[in-house]
Structure formats: structure tokens, C-alpha cells
């Protein structure tokens, strides 16, 4: 009886850091195994809800929501298309790409549960302590709350 492959999830957004994390993952876990990769790959993009993107706005906010939603959908489509292109370029064709509405921290942790993932890969934006405290860190949250191994990929700084 053949055992089922473990699942690896890569969280991606429209940042160069998450693109780097996807490329790093493909290079280290999939490129040399084009015919039989060791993991099932699921790429997950978290699309914010229009209300969370607008925030607490005054009168007239309801009229703006459809335009914000359309823009968020365009961004999600662009992110998904880029992720698929990267996978094809790296000769990884067996990939599931999902767009889920919600906060990235929760979306990624829920994806781990849904897919019974053994590894979650996220990029690091390299925020300092203050910015992390104000904005929150998806990678920190996932490292503490995801029920699997979490790999945080940092893009190397360019040395001059």
C-alpha cells in the first residue's frame, strides 16, 4: 500500500518576500524531484475582506466597498497568476492554488488544518520589533499557532 504524500503549504501575498519564499521552497523541495516531488504543494493567498481593507469609515463607505472588493480580487488574481508562473518556470505542475478571504494569520493556520499539512512556509518581511508590534507578524503568529512545522524564509539582504 503506497503512503500518501505529506502536504506543504506556502503562504503568498503580493510582496517580494513571499515570492522569494515560494521560489526558495520550489528550489529546495521540488526542483530535483520533478517527476515525483516529496510533498503535495498547496499555495494559499489570503484576500482581505473589503470591510477590513476600508476599516471603520464614515457615511458613504458602503458605496466604496464594491470597488474595493473588485480591486482586492484583481490583486488576488495577479498573485495567483504569478505563483502559477513561478511553479511552471520551476517545472512544478502539480500544485493547488487557493484564494481564501480573511486575515492571513487565520487563513494560513486554517489551511494547515484543512489540508493536514506537515509544513507551512511563509516569507519574512524583516520588520523590526516596533513595526512587528504595530502591524503584527503573520510569520510569528503562524510559528506559534500552526499545528505543523513552520519554515520562515528570509530574503537575503543585498550587500554593497
Image (cartoon, helix red, strand yellow):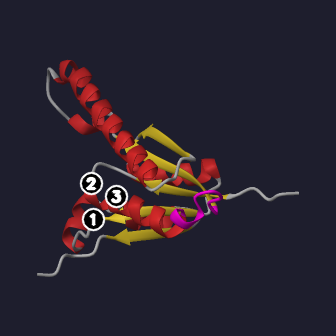
Residue 125's spot in the image, x, y percent? 27, 65
**Element class at badge 2:** loop
Q: Which mark is residue 18?
A: 3
Which residue is drawn at the image coordinates 48% and 49% (left, top)?
43
Q: Is residue 114 left or right of residue 61?
A: right
Tell me if label 1 and label 3 are in contact, CB under 8 Å: no
Magenta stretch holds residue 103:
no
> Of residues 78 and 55, which is closer to you in this image?
78
> Of residues 106 and 157, which is closer to you in this image?
157
Residue 3's spot in the image, x, y percent? 79, 59
Instruction: Give the image quarter of residue 84.
Output: top left
Mark 3 to mark 2 CA distance (whole Å): 6 Å
**Can residue 50 be seen in the rendering of this structure?**
no
Mark 2 to mark 1 CA distance (whole Å): 8 Å
Q: Which mark is residue 15?
A: 2
**Element class at badge 3:** helix
For the record, the magenta segment spans 30-38
Which residue is drawn at the image coordinates 63% and 57% (left, top)?
35
Magenta stretch holds residue 31:
yes
Residue 9's spot in the image, x, y percent? 52, 56
Question: Which residue does the numbered mark 1 point to in the structure image?
Answer: 125
Tell me if label 2 and label 1 are in contact, CB under 8 Å: yes
Tell me if label 3 and label 2 are in contact, CB under 8 Å: yes
The quadrant the N terminus occupies is: bottom right
Most frequent secondary structure within the magenta stretch = loop
Which residue is drawn at the image coordinates 47% and 61% (left, top)?
26
**Up/down of 14 relative to 121, above or below:** above
Q: Is residue 2 left or right of residue 11?
A: right
Q: Is residue 89 left or right of residue 65?
A: right
Amino acid at each position: 500500500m503506497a503512503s500518501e504524500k505529506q502536504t506543504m503549504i506556502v503562504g503568498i501575498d503580493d510582496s517580494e518576500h513571499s515570492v522569494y519564499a515560494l521560489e526558495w521552497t520550489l528550489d529546495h523541495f521540488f526542483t530535483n524531484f520533478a517527476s515525483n516531488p516529496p510533498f503535495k504543494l498547496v499555495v494559499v493567498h489570503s484576500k482581505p475582506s473589503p470591510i477590513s481593507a476600508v476599516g471603520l469609515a464614515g457615511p458613504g463607505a458602503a458605496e466604496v466597498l464594491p470597488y474595493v472588493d473588485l480591486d482586492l480580487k484583481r490583486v488576488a488574481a495577479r498573485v495567483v497568476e504569478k505563483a502559477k508562473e513561478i511553479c511552471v518556470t520551476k517545472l512544478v505542475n502539480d500544485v493547488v492554488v487557493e484564494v481564501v478571504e480573511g486575515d492571513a494569520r487565520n487563513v494560513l493556520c486554517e489551511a494547515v488544518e484543512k489540508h493536514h499539512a506537515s509544513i507551512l512556509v511563509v516569507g519574512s518581511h524583516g520588520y523590526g520589533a516596533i513595526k512587528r508590534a504595530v502591524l503584527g507578524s503573520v510569520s510569528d503568529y503562524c510559528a506559534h499557532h500552526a499545528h505543523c512545522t513552520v519554515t520562515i524564509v528570509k530574503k537575503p539582504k543585498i550587500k554593497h
